Amino acid sequence: MGKKKAKSKKQNRKNPERNREVASLFFALAAFISAYALIIPENSGIAGKAFFNVMFSMFGTAAYMLPVILFWFFIVHIRKSVELREKTDFLWSALSLVSGAVMFSFCALLFQLSVSGGWIGAQLYPFFDRLLGMWLAFSVVAVTFIFFAARLLRISVSSALYNFLKGIKDDIQKSKAAKEVFRKPEIAEKKPDNKPFAFTEPEQKKLEPIKPNIVNKSETEEKPQAGEKTAESKPEPEKSEKVDSKTFAYKLPPADLLPKDAAASFETDKEELLQRAELLKNTLADFGIAAEVQDIIPGPVVTRYDLVLAPGTKIQAVSNIIDNLSLAMRTSSIRVVPIPEKAVVGVEVPNPDSVTVGLRGILESRAFEKSKSLLSLALGKTTDGAGYVSDLADMPHLLIAGATGSGKSVGLHTIILSILYKARPDEVKFMIIDPKRVEMPIYKDIPHMYNPSAPAADADIITNPREAAASLKKLVTVMEDRYSKFAKEMVRNIEDYNNKMAETGGEKEFYIVVVIDELADLMLVVQKEIEDSIQRLAQMARAVGIHLILATQRPSVNVITGIIKANFPARMSFQTTSKIDSRVILDMLGAEDLMGKGDMLFLPKGESRPTRLQGAYVSLKDAQKIISFINGQNFPRLYEPPVVEVEVQSGFNADEKAVKDLIPALKLIKERRSISQDLLKANFGGSARATNILSLLNVKGFISKPEGTNKWQINYDKIEQELNGR
């Protein structure tokens, strides 16, 4: 018999949907019966009259709330998307009835209403009256009732108040914008005095993408102004294109393109947390460490237990038994971190059932909405579930590292999409270098793309290491040009320059965010050129609006050199394979104990201790929706690449002798069917000369050295084309 009962209990647990349906029918019937008995007691029989008398004698007018509460329970159980909170819902229901009864007692006395609070209101009313006075006590009881009712109905009072105030603010802004509409015709009438041609009012209202550019060009070509030379009218279409891009009605992507964040409303089982805290305390006691759990801070992925150690106990004593703690807690990747501000030791334990942190929840957070920076980054959520937003402009550069599968690439997508949610294409541009060629191609068509070595229409993801070296060197030229421009205007940084241009009507400068997905691949091929350009940009580029984001899955000393680390104070480390890698990226241990899948340690600029975050997840499918929304607006991609030419693509100084020796070297390769430095040295004389020729042949693509080998591969077809062309 005992086995059959246990089996039936297991079957009930395995069928929660059926239990919810039965419970919903019960609450619907209970709500109807209670409402009928309270509204028409004379027709509800002996049981109904008894129920009416008991409820009214106990709660008074507040008894009418009971059918509403029971009907709410019916809604909660019938809607399977709503999480059940049976114990807490019962508590909030009882407290709502009690506070409602006391509130009705105050209303009967203060406002002379024909309501009552029953026996409960009569008992509690005098206590609040003597304690706080009539009006103050009524206010406290009313606010308490609203709080309990809001918790029962799962309504956030703070969010409702914030949305209400935000609505008032939006209405005020709309009224101001409506007033400015009447001033626009006056501004439009003044424009023809300053320009050789002007739009008419209907054309100004349209200003659709690309169409204004075509219209303006045709108007200037077909109807030139009288008394003007055609040579003077040619530059005019370029100016009109810039104006069109600035007045383009660009819309930032909405947050509802992304799925809802499951971690926005995660719930925790208090009893389970207390049991795990007791287990942690007992495990420490087994190893002779006396400690008390002061606070439990649950999060969507990790729960932190703050321990107060006994006097004389070292923190290292807890750190030395991490493996034993993991075994006792039946989990992995436990991390011990001191918390000086609370004088406690935090033990971060992964939850048995983690919740995926979505990007949408952070984009809709108050921190991200209030951030005015165009380079705001929605990085993830802290261990207590709060959204974490940082500013790339303050970092000013970011170094990212993590093992394969730790979430590094998803973190890069999150960073790029965060900026796309804040900035127009004429405000921020991306220079993306992706030697792996598999992660970043989805961004190649966005109007935010930038490449200083190519015109705006040809800007694309840079995948060739030598092209990357040349583009970075050209970006240094862009940086120097901007410094000269800012010096003429006597401003210190890009913010001051853009503010001055807004006052004088000049052209603003855009921010440039350089994203390098795999730094190790670049350092293998052109380490010196890459390192030199990164060093110069990292030291000086912040003031002119150029920021670097470097990522690598091999945080070795050869890749992240001392020069690079010195100029990248902000670090982000995902799970690493060893303690050495953690020390290279963060200058401390800890990253090797992370769980992977977006679990990270973020070290902000100027901080000595990193913050543990769960990175926001966004799939490539969701990212594609955002990119399609942006590309669908057909925003014109406009910028002027620098005029200064960078030396031969690899960045080394190719002397004239090496160029003159190119054809003889090609003939030598064709004849000998091989290539080596010794062969060139024997035929051209001098080790330095042979090195220059070898480098030039490599840059031109006549020879190449595949990764992992030390043997030159010869492109005979290209050599034949070059010799036949000469």
Image (tube, grey):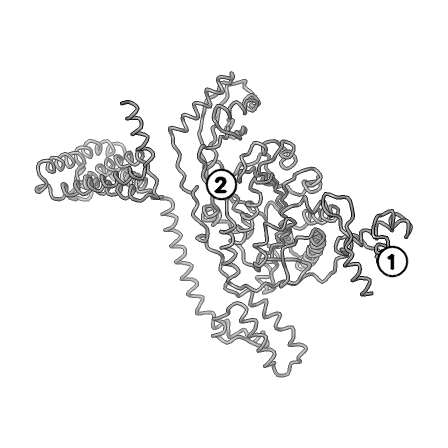
Q: Position of residue 246 (x, y in %)?
A: 55, 64
Q: Quadrant of residue 218?
A: bottom right
> As displayed, is residue 40 above or below residue 582?
below
- Report the label total: 2
Q: Position of residue 690 (x, y in %)?
A: 86, 50
Foreground: disc 2 or disc 1: 1
Q: Position of residue 297 (x, y in %)?
A: 45, 32
Q: Quadrant of residue 146?
A: top left
- Could you give the CA–CA distance between mark 2 and mark 1, rounded to whole angstroms? 62 Å
Q: Earlier in the sequence, mark 2 or mark 1?
A: 2
* Image quadrant occupied by the N terminus: top left
The answer to whether residue 320 is left or right of residue 34 is: right
Q: Quadrant of residue 127?
A: top left
* Residue type beneath disc 1: Pro
Q: Which mark is residue 113?
A: none
* Label 1 Cα neighbours within 10 Å, binned few <14 / some 14-19 / many ≥20: few
- Give 81 or 725, whichever is nearer the viewer: 725
Q: Position of residue 618 (x, y in %)?
A: 50, 47
* Residue type beneath disc 2: Lys
Q: Secondary structure at mark 2?
A: strand
The answer to whether residue 675 is left or right of residue 457 is: right
- Give 555 or 215, whichever is nearer the viewer: 555
**Residue 379 visible at all:** yes
Q: Which residue is mark 1?
A: 664
The answer to whether residue 325 is left or right of residue 171 is: right
* Label 2 Cα neighbours within 10 Å, binned few <14 / some 14-19 / many ≥20: many
Q: Which residue is mark 2?
A: 381
